[in-house]
Amino acid sequence: MLKLELGDAVKQLKKLHAKRVFLQVPEGLKTKTEGIIAELEEKGFEVVTSMDPCFGACDLKQDEAKRMECDAILHLGHTEFVKKTSVPAVYAPLKYELGERFERIIKVITEYLRDERINEVCIVTTAQFLHYLPLLKKELEKIKVKVRIEKGKRVEEGQVLGCNYSSAETKALAIIYFGDGLFHPLGIHFATGKKIIIANPIDLQIRPLEEEKDDFLRKRIMLIERAKEAKSYAILVSTKEGQNRASEAEKIKKELEKKGKTARIYTMDFISQEALLGIEAEAYINTACPRISIDDYLNYKKPIINYPEVEYLLGKKDYEKYKLEYIY
Amino acid sequence: MLKLELGDAVKQLKKLHAKRVFLQVPEGLKTKTEGIIAELEEKGFEVVTSMDPCFGACDLKQDEAKRMECDAILHLGHTEFVKKTSVPAVYAPLKYELGERFERIIKVITEYLRDERINEVCIVTTAQFLHYLPLLKKELEKIKVKVRIEKGKRVEEGQVLGCNYSSAETKALAIIYFGDGLFHPLGIHFATGKKIIIANPIDLQIRPLEEEKDDFLRKRIMLIERAKEAKSYAILVSTKEGQNRASEAEKIKKELEKKGKTARIYTMDFISQEALLGIEAEAYINTACPRISIDDYLNYKKPIINYPEVEYLLGKKDYEKYKLEYIY
């Protein structure tokens, strides 16, 4: 069960003497918005709520908060991302409470490590399970497994983001991804080249990342090869503060033009096929959230690749050494 | 036929020594975007194009232009709206070229005025037909009709906007709306109380605004009465620079709260039902573009009214004197 903890955030807001708060709510919490506002109002805050789609703390609406004369931003469900802000920002995490599932997944993990004779692991997870990492470490140390929780750059200890896998840079040979879904484990594998074990505390399954790796790579190569055939490119830049990569877009534009291609820069707040309907470019280069071209590429009518993949398209890098770059 | 004239805009951009231009394209021109970029590139500009939906010059993306390191904004299809800008803005109008239709509509108008024995009129229109107003004036003066083109506030001479009918403030008893559609003629009528004649240069018809007035008023009253029954309100504020009415929203919130209602402020870039799905408030108060609640109210699941209409909801004003306020 996902649980929102406002207590710490309220304390931080009080400490900032914030009176008028600009509230940003992630998509998964939008239906709970009014309850959250009521709770904040009870604590004495005036609340202005942003209803624009919000998928991460990279989407920090400072300009909008200023325009609405708010003296702080309260960002729900994500951890700090934009470091220097002109409006103070406070983050309230969304924590997944596993209940008795935690003990059960511990049992699953310890058995697996014993069977596989693994005695050293690095453990990583996403924001919503982050509070379980120290507990997991403690439990695994009980069975004499050496556990590393690495401090990545610009993230919490052991935290991975779709655009930042630096917490998976480790001396350990195996990495346990404690969480749900394939997006992050694939990212960790292609960022580090390490063996990835997926321990899913929701369905209580554990298994190594296997054939999905080849499948993922095949799809990336297919997309990049299709994009390579294009004569004209739309380089997509999000105007969201933490996703804005204007200079990278400029660099890629010049490189593509050197190869005789047409390349133009398009900005959007939220990148979508709908916003691109008027554009006839034959392929898209995404400089915003990498998830757009990895999880959602089927939503686009033209091949869409992430901007670090342009190096493969230009023949500067070889598919055999395909690597997902941290772009943040 | 709609015709985009870039010549003057290019001159203005050169005069500003602009090198990198942030291009904003209205929805009706989006499919022509790449041709326009090519034309600007030929003139030596670097172009960054915004693909966010754009319906007016109230939507001036200065923050985004700065983030993309552009030194000027080129806004297509609309006239100046935001007066003080930190990034210089240049406007390129979209002109409707009537061709031989112009002579034909002149004939239609002159016959109508003769038949109705009208010898003084004020003429108004929207941006795309603005270049015809002096010609229309000249033609009507030939048949001894006194023609007034009023200089409204913050608009061009004779220009009306959905949020500003000040060019229709006139001593003349009749106002000719030279243009298409019912949105503006209804607005002019309910802003001025004057007799409105619609002269449509597209279908070459002329007629007074008649029963639509009652129909419009009936719908507004119905919406306001439905909104009056609500216990909770979502006050919608656009974060678009020229549509942002934070202080009006605050004022309305306080007035509704005084009446024992719940009222909360929500911001969005582009206001839509989709963005409001998580919100259970029973009615919406729109402080952004008035067209949202006039032309598009059927898109919303809850009654949506414009913020000046809150005065009727609160019983401060009487429906018999229903008036559309200029909100800009």
Image (cartoon, coloured by chain):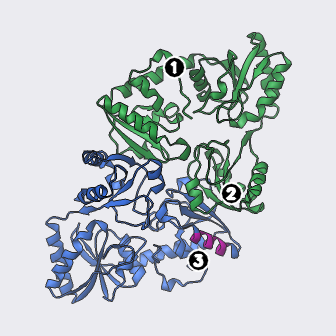
Chain colours: A blue, B green
* Residue A130 place in picture, x, y as percent: 27, 70
- Kind of residue indicated by mark 3: Leu
Chain at numbered mark 1: B
Q: CA distance from mark 1 to mark 2?
A: 42 Å
Asked if the residues shown at circle 2 and circle 3 are in contact, with their CB atoms under 8 angstroms apart, the answer is: no
- Going by the numbered disc 1, the residue's amino acid type is Asp
Q: Main secondary structure of the magenta part?
A: helix
Q: How many marks?
A: 3
**SS at mark 3?**
helix
Stretch of the chain drawn in magenta: A247-256
Mark closer to the chain start, 1 or 2: 2
- Asked if A256 appears above or below A298 in the picture, the reply is below
**Residue A298: percent from the left, percent from the top?**
48, 62
Residue at (35%, 75%) from the top-left corner?
A185
Q: Which mark is residue B34?
A: 2
Q: Give the amino acid type for the residue marked by disc 2 in the picture.
A: Glu
Q: Nearer the viewer, residue A73 or A302?
A: A73
Residue drawn 82% across the image and 31% down it = B100
Determine the chain carrying the residue at label 3: A
Measure the C-alpha gap from mark 1 to mark 3.
60 Å
Left or right, A22 with reference to B1: left
Tag 1–tag 3 contact (CB < 8 Å): no
Query: Closer to the camera: disc 1 or disc 3?
Result: 1
- Residue A95 in the image, given as x and y percentages of width and height: 25, 62
Q: Can you tell which mark lies on residue B215?
A: 1
Tag shown at residue A313 = 3
Label 3 environment density (alpha carbons within 10 Å; few <14, some 14–19, many ≥20) = many
